[in-house]
Amino acid sequence: MSSGADAERGSGDGWTRRRFVGTLTGAAAVTTVAAPAAPRTVPPADPVRAPTTGTSPSPTGRSSTRPLFLGTYTSVEGGGKGIGLATYDSTTGQVTGTGAVITGVGDPSYLAPQSDGRTLFAVDEREDGGVTAVRLADNEVLGRRGTGGSSPCHVSVHPSGRWLLSANYGSGSVAVHPIDSSGALGEHTDVVTHSSPAPGPGQQGPHAHQFITSPDGGHVLAVDLGTDTVYTYRLDESEGTLTEVSQAHTRPGAGPRHLTFHPGGRFAYLANEVDNTVAVCAYDPATGRLTPGDPQSTGTGGGTSYPAQILVTSDGSYAYLANRGHNSLTRYAIEADGARLKLLDTVPVGGDFPRHLAFSPDGKLLFAANQRSSTVSVFHVDGSSGELRLAGEPFASPVAVCAVPL
C-alpha cells in the first residue's frame, strides 16, 4: 500500500483511515466530541416540504426546489454540526443553504434514505459505532443504535424496508438492524466480522466499506477493503440474520471499496481504492456468486487517485467514477448489456477529494461531495452522450463527505 494510504489509516490514535485523508489540511487538528446532546433541529425546518420562496416554477407549474441532505464529520476542525440541510433547483442545479442542521448525530459521514422518503438513516462514524434514524416529516431524531463494531462508514436499506444494513470499517464487520413501522431502529439482529481470508498487503485487518442488496433482492453483498474480498450473504428476512454463501476475491492489494450494479442485474462494477482500478464483475442471481474480471484503468495516469465511488445511470448506458487524488470524475460507456466498460474521459470535479456521488431522482443531475475543499459540485448529465457539465460554482458545505438529493 502507498504511504499516502498508510497515513490515511492513522496510527493507534482513534482516527480512521477514511477520516485522516479527508482532513482539511495536513495540519488540521482532529478532536473527539463528547456524546451528543439531546437531539434537536436548529432552526426547525422541513426538508421534504422545502421552502419555495424565490424559486422558479418548473414547466409543469410545480416548484423545482428539492431537499438536499449533507453528511459531514462533526469531530474534525472545520467540520459540520450535524446533518446539513439545503435545497437545490432540479432544473438549474443551483444549491441554496437553509441554515438548518439536524443535530444530535455524531459524525454522520454517510446517509441513506428509505425508499418511501419518510426516514433518513445516518452512520455515526466513531469508535463506538452507531446508526441513527431521522423522521423527515419534522426532522425528528428517532434514536441511535450501536452497530456492534467501530467506525461504520456505509448504510443501505433492504428493499423490503424492514432492515438496515451497515458496514463497520474499523472492526471489519457488517450489521443488520430492524426498522419498525415508524422508521425507528431496533437493536442489531446480527453482526458478522470478516475473519477470513487474511488481510491483504499493507492492511492490518478487515475493513468493511459497503453493504448492499443485489438487484434481485436475493442476496446482500459486503465489500471489504482490508481482505480484498466481496462477501455474499443470504439475509433471513424474518430473523434478520446472515448466512455467508460465497466470497469473491480481487487481486491482492486492490483494496475494493465500492460496488454498483448494472440495472440488468447480471453485472456490477467494483472500484478498487488502493490499486487505482475498476473491474467489471459477473453476478449470478441464483447463487449470489460474484466473479471479478480484469482490473481496468481509471484514466487518471500514474500514482494512486483513491477511487471512491462508482455510479451507473438508470438506463445502464454510462458509469461515473470519483477519483479523490486526481480530483476528477471518470466517464465510462457501458457496452454489451453491462459486460464491458469503455473509458471515455475524465472531467475536473471542481473541488478537492470527491468522496461521494449521487444522482438526483430524475438522473439529470450528479452531485459530488468534495471532502477537503468543503464543497458540493453539481453537474448536468446529458442523457444521450453521458457528458457532464458543471452547474455553476460549487456549494460550500463544511467537510462535505456525502450529499443526498431527494
Image (tube, rainbow, N blue to C red):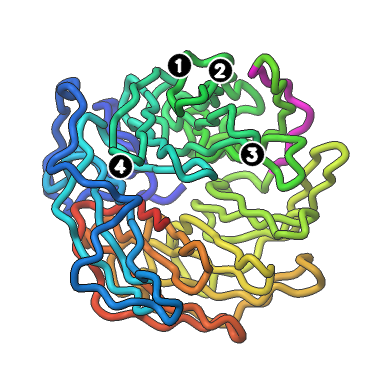
* Residue at image coords 41%, 36%: 121
Is residue 246 found inside the magenta-colored segment of the image? Answer: yes
Give the total of numbered labels.
4
Query: Amino acid under label 1?
Result: Gly
Give me the disc on residue 191.
2
Label 3 neighbour load within 10 Å: few <14, some 14-19, many 20+: some
Residue 148's label in the rendered image is 1
> Is residue 300 shown to the viewer in this render?
no
Give the extent of the magenta segment: 240-249
Looking at the image, which is closer to me, 165 or 291?
165
Residue 2 lies in the magenta-colored region: no
**Numbered tag placed on residue 19 in the rendering:** 4
Distance from disc 3 to disc 1, alpha carbons, whole Å, reads 23 Å
Which of label 3 and label 1 is nearer to you? 3
Amino acid of disc 4:
Arg
Q: What residue type is labelled 3?
A: Pro
- Along the line of sight, the residue nearer the viewer: 67 or 146: 67
Would you say 49 lies left or right of 322 here? left
Distance of mark 1 from mark 2, alpha carbons?
A: 7 Å
Circle 4 Cα neighbour tier, 10 Å, few/some/many (<14 / 14–19 / ≥20)? many
Q: What element carries label 1?
A: loop
Residue at image point 14% right, 53% down:
99
The quadrant holding residue 58 is bottom left
Camera-near label (4 vs 2) is: 2
Q: Which of marks 1 and 2 is nearer the N terminus?
A: 1
* The furthest residue to the front: 61
Dot 3 or dot 4, earlier in sequence: 4
Are the two marked residues, 3 and 4, in contact with CB atoms closer than 8 angstroms?
no
Indicate whether 283 appears above or below 296: above
Q: Which of marks 4 and 1 is in front?
A: 1
